[in-house]
Image: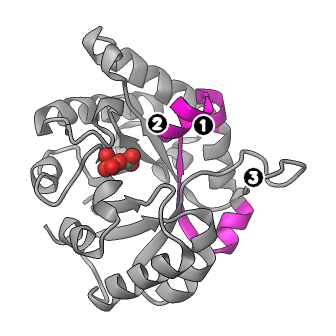
Amino acid sequence: MRRALIIGNWKMHKTVAEAVAFARALSARFPERAERDVAIAPPFTALHPLREVLRGSPIALCAQDVHGEDEGPYTGEVSAPMLADVGCLYGLVGHSERRRLFGESNEEVNRKARALLRAGIRPVVCVGEALEEREADQTFSVIRRQLKEGLNNLSADDIRRTIVAYEPVWAIGTGKTASPAQAQEVHDFIRQFIGHRAGKETAAEVRILYGGSVNPENAASLMAQRDIDGVLAGGASLEVDSFRKLIDH
Ligand code: PGA
């Protein structure tokens, strides 16, 4: 009943020309009505041109980040209404690179998620433990805190529109994927948390994606797990062929 969702996170890669060429090649080989939801998260500069290229295609746009306020004196930032204006359906918040390299806190993640919801965009709230935390048996306490604070003040309806992405930090860009069983264990924990927070029905509807060194070879076994509803892929989304295989696997 939960539709699978595959998001390609390009991070800081691709000029407008490269992004447009990718989107044209991908959409040319895309059925009009796909069985899975698919989105690309390009850098901000490519959002508007991609919107034009993807008009009428089932491939959606996802922002990589957003500011928590709707407008104001925040040089260099992009707001949720601006992202809605260029057609974003989804927006990542709290990616581990934002948390680790730019000091983003759970409170900020929460402000960003609420800003996206106000603008009618579905937040993709990223959570995940670092290697030291996993080794110190802190995985569940870290995830619980990221969810508790990250989803603070969200109504059950807001949570229904939210997507959670579990991305163990040790698996991102390292070639080390969590095993399907390791990932499923955390996804189950996340769904239970949402159940307590927003009710069982909501928990049954929320899509929980896995991310961290996903590739066309390992995607199927991850997505076969009961609580894994899709993937958030970085490296494997940069080439049309591998992204295509990830969608089709
Ligand atoms: P990766 O990145 O697939 O290259 O590990 C995933 C992510 O950071 O979302």
Separation of residues labelled 3 and 2 (CA atoms): 19 Å
Query: Who's the residue at 53% across and 67% down the image?
Result: 89
Relative height, residue 181 to residue 215 (above, below):
above
Q: Which mark is residue 109?
A: 1
Does dot 3 land on a helix, a strand or a loop?
loop
Q: Which residue is mark 3?
A: 77
**Residue 44 visible somewhere in the drawing:** yes
Query: Who's the residue at 63% across and 62% down the image?
Result: 120
- x, y percent for residue 19: 47, 76
| Pointer 3 or 1: first along the chain | 3
Q: Nearer the viewer, mark 3 or mark 1?
A: 3
State how many labels appear: 3
Q: Which residue is mark 2?
A: 96
Q: Which residues are magenta?
A: 81-110
Residue 3 belongs to the span the image colors magenta: no
**Residue 151 visible somewhere in the drawing:** no
Query: Who's the residue at 46% across and 90% down the image?
Result: 56
What amino acid type is highlighted by mark number 2? Ser
Q: Are marks 3 and 1 in contact (CB under 8 Å)?
A: no
| Pointer 2 or 1: first along the chain | 2
